[in-house]
Amino acid sequence: MLPEPYRLHHRADFSRTVRRGQRIGRRDLVVHALAHGYDGGVGANGRHDQVPDDLLVRVGGPRFGLIVSKAVGNAVIRHRVARRLRHMCAQVVDELPPGTDVVIRALPGAATASSEDLLRQVRTALRKLGLTAETGVSTGGRA
């Protein structure tokens, strides 16, 4: 189970990550990531104001959100895929910087992919997005 501080809940957080973040596609999933302090908010006067990072309180480390649509399968399959992806997020949470939001969109192939393959795809995507270090990640025996 992924602890509460590591979850995205609000639609605005999902939208911000998908629209403003970087994206990389893998065979069975698409990973969207947004590393940020804060990108501004609406002030009391209704205008968009910049808020300095030191005035914000952000609890927890990197946050993850999942998108598993009906294209993946029926409700049982979708929930199974979501549980597997949450477990993978819990495994990589310590590898990411604290101010990162990650949205993982499952593609139809995620329903039949092995957990090891999905974890490899998640780690590869995060590494290619520059969020994790290349050292310490197995490259399949290549030097």
Image (tube, rainbow, N blue to C red):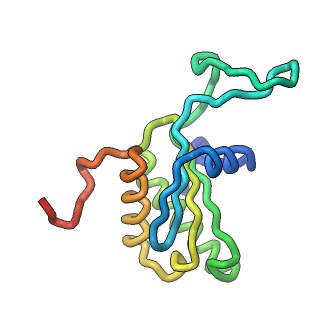
Q: Is residue 27 left or right of residue 6?
A: left
Number of dots carrying numbers: 0
Q: Residue at x 61, y 59 (%)?
A: 66
Vertical comparison of 64 with 74: above or below: above
Q: Name the residue nearer the viewer: 53 or 79.
A: 53
Vertical comparison of 38 with 35: above or below: above
Q: Position of residue 3 (x, y in %)?
A: 57, 48
Q: Residue at x 27, y 54 (%)?
A: 137
Q: Residue at x 46, y 60 (%)?
A: 88
Q: Is residue 117 left or right of residue 54?
A: left
Q: Is residue 4 left or right of residue 75?
A: left
Residue 49's image quarter?
top right
Q: Residue at x 68, y 21 (%)?
A: 50
Vertical comparison of 49 with 78: above or below: above
Residue that lies at the very extreme toward the right in this rendered image: 45
Q: Position of residue 10 (x, y in %)?
A: 73, 47
| The N terminus, quarter of image | bottom right
Q: Position of residue 122 (x, y in %)?
A: 43, 60
Q: Position of residue 115 (x, y in %)?
A: 43, 72
Residue 46's image quarter?
top right
Q: Name the residue nearer the viewer: 7 or 126.
A: 126
Q: Is residue 66 left or right of residue 31?
A: right
Vertical comparison of 13 with 40: above or below: below
Residue 52's image quarter?
top right
| The C terminus, quarter of image | bottom left
